[in-house]
Amino acid sequence: MAQLQLRYVAGEIDQVQVHDELMRWYRPDVAPAVDVRPLPPEQPGRVYPYAAEMATLMEEMNELPPYVPYIVMDETIPEL
């Protein structure tokens, strides 16, 4: 997914191609959109814009503490 998004940000592919590729991976039983265009071949070693910043952001996000809600409410139903 990250590689597809990098290619989308770089302008190599459009949102329809991203969607169709994801559907091909996760839902092969669903027919792709009518105007499917094949993905252009990947270019090994190509440096995508903002790739380093995205990698740094992902590392920072992985180091965050787990989410804790502000208030934990008792959702049990009192018996009468």
Image (spheres, rainbow, N blue to C red):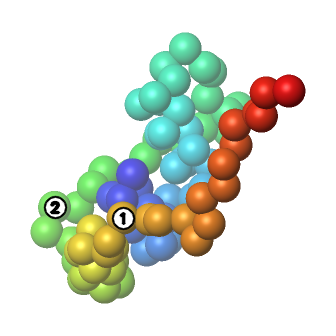
Residue marked by disc 1: 66
Of residues 17 and 5, which is closer to you in this image?
A: 5
Q: Is residue 12 in view?
A: no
> In the rendered image of this protein, does residue 19 appear above or below residue 73?
above
Amino acid type indicated by mark 2: Pro
Q: Position of residue 54 (x, y in %)?
A: 33, 77
Residue 9 % position (x, y): 48, 72
- Residue 69: x and y in percent read 55, 65
Name the front one of labels 2 and 1: 1
> Which quarter of the image is occupied by the C terminus?
top right
**SS type, badge 1:** loop
Residue drawn 32% across the image and 71% down it: 65
Circle 2 is placed at which residue position?
A: 44
Kindly state the secondary structure of the residue where label 2 is placed. loop
Q: What mark, if any, has residue 52 been given in the picture?
A: none
Tell me: residue 19, above or below residue 23. below
For this view, does 11 lie left or right of residue 66? right
Q: Earlier in the sequence, mark 2 or mark 1?
A: 2
Residue at far right of view = 80
Q: Amino acid at mark 1?
A: Pro
* Mark 1 Cα-neighbour bin, 10 Å: few <14, some 14–19, many ≥20: few
> Is label 2 in contact with label 1 (beta carbons under 8 Å)?
no
Q: CA distance from mark 2 to mark 1?
A: 35 Å
Q: Say which residue appears at 33% left-offset and 58% top-offset.
A: 3
Q: Nearer the viewer, residue 59 or 6?
A: 59
Quarter of the figure with residue 7: bottom left
Question: What residue is shown at x 31% (from left), y 74% (from top)?
Answer: 64
Displayed quadrant of residue 37: top right
